[in-house]
Image (spheres, coloured by chain):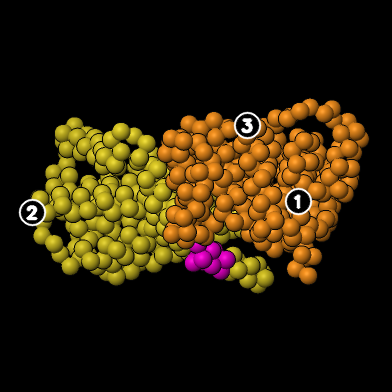
Amino acid sequence: MEKEENIIEFRHVTKTYKLYKNDKQRLMAVFNKRIKYIPKKAVNDLSFEIKRGEAVAFLGKNGAGKSTILKIVTGVTYPTEGEVIVRGRVSALLELTAGFDKEMTGRENIYLKGQIMGIRDEEIHKLEETIVDFADIGDYMDQPVRSYSSGMKARLGFAININTHPEILIIDEALSVGDKAFRRKCVSKVNEIMDSEDVTLLFVTHSTEMAREFCHRGIVLKNGRQIYDSDIDSALDLYETAINVKKKPDTKDA
Amino acid sequence: MLKKNEKDIMELKNLVKDHVEWRHQIFKLAKSDLIKTYSGAALGWAWAIIKPSVTIFVYWFAFSIGLRHRGDIYGFPFFLWLIAGMVPWFYIQEMLTQGTTCMRRYKHLITKMKFPVSTIPTFVGMSKFVIHLLLFAIVIVIYFLFGEPFTLYYLQLPIYMLLMFLFCVGWTLFGSVLAAISQDFANLVKSFTTALFWLSGIMWPVNKITNHVGRMLLKMNPITFTCEGYRNCLIHKVWIWQEPKELAVYLIEIVIMWALALWAFKKLKKDMPDVL
């Protein structure tokens, strides 16, 4: 029955960002409660459940609340209201191209990420080779990350995320900067660990083609609310028609 | 009121718990912070020594050669007296400038992964502390070269170092959280750093100041306590318990600093990832 366990539960989750007029107002607000701000609901009364082993795509326009949901799942940001339950280790990097220490080399970042995830040095040492092989960025592995192109960062980020045995794997749209061959490699690797390790996948993208490749369930969001939750094909249809997004192959989104 | 106190204690408990659970990572991150600071430049580690040496030389030149009114202080050459107080100041200065911006520099730990944010000031403080120890070792060598014998008073140095570390990390937690919320705060601290230098007992022997109020205020300053503490060991030959009033004031200041830090952290930790 373990298959039926909810690995992620959102119960009436709302996240409100406070928008201040400027930095000074924000500092003043620490000491003075009367300073005004514009409340902006990024996620609005959202409830859903994800079972272990599912592959879910979050679809929606920019600002629909996709990234905020992932941030809440990762534990990076806190919901303003509601309850969130996450039962499992989330992958090391929230965004594939970010979260690196830019002054350190790719290899040093592998160790750093591993250490932060609580993996012992000997184990990271074993993983290192796998990650280096998978990322396949050659001599750049020993160069500072600041010299990387966005494609290389995505490669390294994906290699770290997928090889550090997460229970919940997060993949964001940054993967679309990778080339076709690398993406194919990613898809087969994701399928492999989803079968063998029962990993749960959360996927955020604007590329419908990739969503179809990775996921079987789609949640469509609009202005922080969930407007549809079903199998991936009908979710994508709805996303393309109802929200009126014209289909573009491989939409890049920064 | 009681409930509020309980919450503050909870916050302290969480902070200690995070530090214990993540102790290995804290050491690793301190190490990488240290390497990162100096590995980018060609001269690398030499900068850790060159920068403070230049500063000390400038002050020594200005006071000994330029203003020419400094002879020996408490029977010690001005240079020796100066470095005993300057070296702790360099640490405090690093924590005021680098420490305050640490949340911004390490924002990938805050916004891109789950990480106990309260440990960031700690590992930054540890990384700077290694440089402090290095500089201090050089000070000791210089004292030997000047023919100053080792005394038992040196043994209390770790106490002063620990107290300084505690105070500075408390400050950094407080300052860096506010600086994360607002760049204005970081700029404010930056512009007050030089003022703090001259308003502390680093360049003047506190006990020789004749203005009563001025001396009182100067002695209340935690930076003065630290620098005088180092001089107590190296120059004045005074034990820490022989100045109980100063010690008590300093300890109270550490407690206040940490209370402020916990207050700011509790209030703003949920806002930080949204702002950075």
Whichever of callouts 1 and 3 sits on the residue coming sooner in the sequence is: 1
Q: Nearer the viewer, residue B45 or A107?
A: A107
Residue drawn at x 66%, y 38% is: A184
Q: Residue at coordinates 69% horizontally, 38% vertically from top-left?
A: A173
Left or right: B101, with B8 as reference point:
left
Q: Is residue A41 left or right of residue B257?
A: right
The amino acid type found where label 2 is placed reads Gly
Tell me the SS state at disc 2.
loop
Task: Kindly identify which numbered label has been placed on residue A55.
Answer: 1
Do the dots labelled 2 and 1 sit on one chain? no
Q: What is the CA distance from the residue labelled 2 to the residue labelled 1?
A: 73 Å
Residue type (three-letter) at the residue carrying disc 1: Ala
Determine which residue is flagged by label 3: A179
Q: Is residue A84 left or right of residue A151?
A: right
Residue B107 x, y percent position in the rendering:
55, 44
What segment is highlighted magenta in the picture?
B13-22
Q: Nearer the viewer, mark 3 or mark 2?
A: 3
- The residue closer to the viewer here, A138 or B19, is A138
User: Label 3's element?
Assistant: loop
Q: Quadrant of residue A149?
A: top right
- Where does label 2 land, which residue? B147
Q: Are marks 1 and 3 on the same chain?
A: yes
Output the letter for the chain in yellow: B
Q: Residue at x 19, y 32 (%)?
A: B66
Subunit under mark 3: A
